Amino acid sequence: MIGMAVVGYGYWGPNLVRNIADTPGVQLLTVCDLQPERLASVKGRYPAVTVTSDYEELLRDPRIHAIAIATPVSSHFRLAMSALMAGKHVFVEKPITPSAEEAQRLVDEAERRGLVLAVDHTFVHTSAVRKMRELVGSELGDIYYYDSVRVNLGLFQHDVSVIWDLAVHDLSIIDYVIPEKPVAVSATGVSHVAGEPENIAYLNLFFESNLIAHIHVNWLAPVKLRRTLIGGSRQMIVYDDLEPSEKIKVYDKGITLTGGQPLQGGKDVYQMMVGYRTGDMRAPHLDVVEALGSEIREFLHCIEHNGTPVADGQAGLRVVSVLEAATRSLAQRGRVMELQPARRVA
């Protein structure tokens, strides 16, 4: 039986606690939070679970083999590094850290100690996103674009901008679904609340091929939208996460290009003739599973069998590297930032 503890019982912590408590093969031993009223809520719902405001108690407890961290981003590195150094496996909320350097240090520490480091990139564990990965690899053909809108009214964050709160989801989906990795990023955005981080932003990701990705994130929209388009040379996908039943729709639509006649007296320039192809739409069947529960089960399986999570520390590092570069681009009004391979920190 694997013993686990959860740090942070605010917005996401209750979901973690519920899923861990309901998962066979794991025992939820302790929940840690600094606010007494939150700990009282835990005790009321889970009487057998120990509660504490002292994080060091978790590190000293030999019964606790793994710690799930659901605290503000600024505390992720300190808490995760302390857990790894205490020999605990770590499951940390997204984004893994506020900087690529800190993420790399966590990756190195986990590898050095043979511990599992998993990042809560929840969407890569949904049936819809896994189906998209399958379709991208088998049916769509060459991928032309990824275009996403992820907007709603709130929740405004005080410690991170909207790209660290919302765009992180699309970046993790792109990292999982698209075989290529981005080589550059640009971002523009603005804050409408004095002294606070950007609440609306637009990101563009560039790749070695002619694939381009565009992400629109916004805390100041009148409606909630979670819609993604993926265009391929053979088929196209519409993914609407708010759709209750048919979240994925696959369209047999696209264009065909044929070379035209030479222009301007035989110069080596050809006019391209565009033909449009319109076929059927289908909505693949998707399993109804809670993504967070799947994540927890995968995390436990990796601990027991020395495996690697789908969203491991390296995936978290790649996403944070893009977020960091996008933040620099924001400060320079959309300047394109090249993405360098992460360097190991000694």
Image (spheres, grey):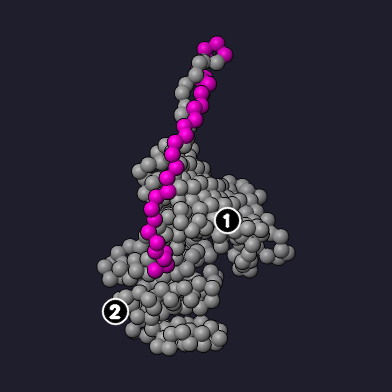
Q: Name the residue carrying label 1.
A: 225
Q: Name the residue carrying label 2.
A: 1
Whether residue 285 is in magenta: the answer is: yes
Name the spot of residue 182 as percent of width and height, x first: 47, 47
**Of callouts 2 and 1, the N-terminal one:** 2
Name the spot of residue 145 as percent of width and height, x first: 50, 42
The image's mark for residue 268 is: none
Q: Secondary structure at mark 1?
A: strand
Mark 2 vs mark 1: give the one in front.
1
> Dividing the image into 4 quarters, which one contains the N terminus?
bottom left
308 vs 42, nearest the viewer = 42
Label tally: 2
Name the spot of residue 119 as percent of width and height, x first: 43, 65
Question: Given the image, on which type of amino acid does mark 1 rest?
Answer: Leu
The residue segment tinted magenta is: 264-293
Q: Residue at x 51, y 78 (%)?
A: 9
As drawn, which residue projects farthest toward the right? 194
> Dividing the image into 4 quarters, which one contains the C terminus?
bottom left
Q: Quadrant of residue 233?
A: top left
As drawn, which residue projects farthest toward the top? 265
- Side (left or right) of 191 relative to 9: right
Whether residue 209 is in magenta: the answer is: no
Against 193, is 32 above or below?
below
Residue 258 seen in render: yes
Q: Secondary structure at mark 2?
A: loop
Circles 2 and 1: CB distance less than 8 Å?
A: no
Name the spot of residue 313 as percent of width and height, x first: 41, 63
Question: Given the image, on which type of amino acid does mark 2 rest?
Answer: Met
As drawn, which residue projects farthest toward the left? 305
Q: Residue at x 42, y 48 (%)?
A: 283
